[in-house]
Image: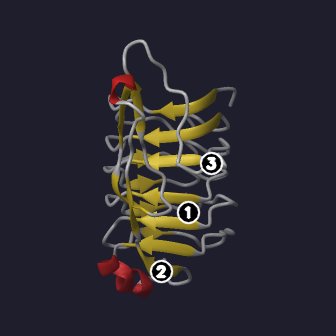
Amino acid sequence: GSKRFDTLVIPSTVTSFGKEVFDGSKIKVLVVPGNIQTITKNAFYACEIETIILKEGITKIEEFGLSGNYVTSLTLPSTITDLEYCALDCSKLKTIVCLATEPPTANFTNYSTNIDTVYVPANSVSKYKASSDWEDKVILPIEYCNVTLATADNTFGTVSGEGSLIKGASTEITATPADGYRFVKWSDENTDN
């Protein structure tokens, strides 16, 4: 519980980790690669995580795997099939974007959840609404928005991660400075930044 990370990116060379491995650590941003198929019991319990990025390949989140964190929205990869009891018990979690075309099994019973809206692929809305695991949630089709990234001058470096992205979902964008330069800030062309 004494580990602190601003950003924890699990290396793609890691294929599994034990239960409670980061339990109680302080992590702001967590990125879990898809070669870790299962997020184990209590792996990231009460870590105060604000942003979680789960990559394609993850199929299961065990009991309390991501519970007790500060995320307000979460995107589940299309490969997710199983959410065990209290897997996502986060008091601030209001919205889930689930990319799975088949509704994952999800045990939301006997714990309080503030999850009220779940966005799913448009062709899967009726499946989620018919699923007893998801029937008490508002199920809506995923919305997309186009994001364009640019640098002030390409000689300073490059940016990547643009495209048609899921509205409201966390995603990775990257700024790579050229030799002799450093990244200073992002701007959304809003002068109130």
User: What's the residue type where badge 3 is placed?
Assistant: Thr
The spot of residue 98 in percent (x, y) is: 42, 66
For the point 48% across and 52% down, which residue is it? 170
Task: Using the rendered image of the protein, determine whether residue 100 is visible from the camera's viewpoint.
Answer: yes
Is residue 66 shown left or right of residue 170? right
Q: Which residue is mark 1?
A: 85
Can you say which quadrant of the picture contains the N terminus?
top right
The alpha-carbon separation of the residues under discs 3 and 2 comes to: 36 Å
The alpha-carbon separation of the residues under discs 1 and 2 comes to: 20 Å
For the point 36% across and 64% down, which residue is it? 99
Q: Which residue is mark 3?
A: 191
Above/below status of 31 relative to 59: above
Q: Are marks 1 and 3 in contact (CB under 8 Å)?
A: no
Above/below status of 113 relative to 66: below
Q: Which residue is mark 2?
A: 139
For the point 34% across and 24% down, which residue is it? 155
